[in-house]
Amino acid sequence: RIEWTLGRVPVPQRVTVAFGPARQTLMVDATLDTPWDSEPFGEVVSFFEGLQGSTEDLVLAGDRWVLGAPGGLIEVSSDGSVSRLPVSGGDIERGWGVAMDGAGVLWVVDSAQQQLVRVADGVATAVLTQADGQVFAGMNDVEVGPDAKIYVSDPCTARIVRFDPLTEEPDLTLSFDAATDG
């Protein structure tokens, strides 16, 4: 088991590694000895300068990055070229959360339309807009779990919904206290 604490540099960082009864803690003063200067990477800067709105999430999809953005999805190839990821079937207005499962299917939270979208073979299909009779109000993030099910967060309705891609139905809702956990 590994535990760590993080903070702003140069605050001392503590990393604790435990294996059974054995436990070791290391203290590290994390600093930036050499300032990090960003370098231009392909067309990325010029592409994003013209984007109206913000990108929110990204996933490494094979040899490219896929980002959620206003108007859908954006892909950045390893050579730095940037383009819209073309999809058919349905529109993605504002890709917020993006995840990819083991089969290469993209799962996208469209926060503008409050829906979970599956993108397989370039076809976008809305698969989830409500759970337990309650529509989503603030879909935020999507993750693929180790069980290959899809987890969607909605802090505005104080819940996390698990979606089963095999049955195409939500099969679990975890509620939390929005005031303290949202």
Image (cartoon, rainbow, N blue to C red):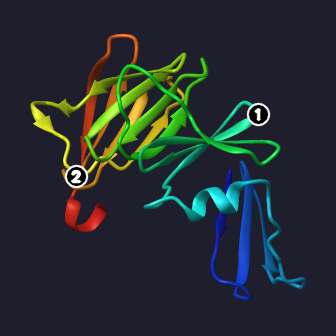
Describe the element under mark 2 as helix, strand or loop: loop
Q: Which residue is mark 2?
A: 158
**Which quarter of the rendered picture does the C terminus lie within?**
bottom left
- Locate residue 71: give its quadrant: top left
- Mark 2–mark 1 Cα distance, whole angstroms, equals 35 Å
Answer with left or right where residue 179 lies relative to residue 181.
Answer: left
The residue closer to the viewer here, 65 or 157, is 65
| Mark 2 vs 1, N-terminal side | 1
Question: Residue, x 20% and y 42% (percent of image)?
Answer: 136
Question: Residue, x 38% and y 40% (percent of image)?
Answer: 109
Please identify the residue farthest to the right as the structure is shown: 34
Foreground tag (2 vs 1): 1
Please identify the residue farthest to the bottom as the structure is shown: 10
Could you classify mark 1 by the number of other residues whose Cα lies within 10 Å: few (under 14), some (14-19), or many (20 or more)?
Answer: few
Q: Which residue is mark 1?
A: 63
Residue 54 place in picture, x, y as percent: 47, 61
The residue closer to the viewer here, 129 or 27, is 129
Relative vertical location of residue 10 with respect to residue 60 in this rendering, above or below: below
Answer with left or right where residue 136 lies relative to residue 98.
Answer: left
- Tell me which amino acid carries mark 2: Ala
Relative vertical location of residue 45 with respect to residue 171 in this rendering, above or below: below
Describe the element under mark 1 as helix, strand or loop: loop
Please identify the residue farthest to the left as the structure is shown: 133
Question: Residue, x 71% and y 37% (percent of image)?
Answer: 64
- Tell me which amino acid carries mark 1: Asp
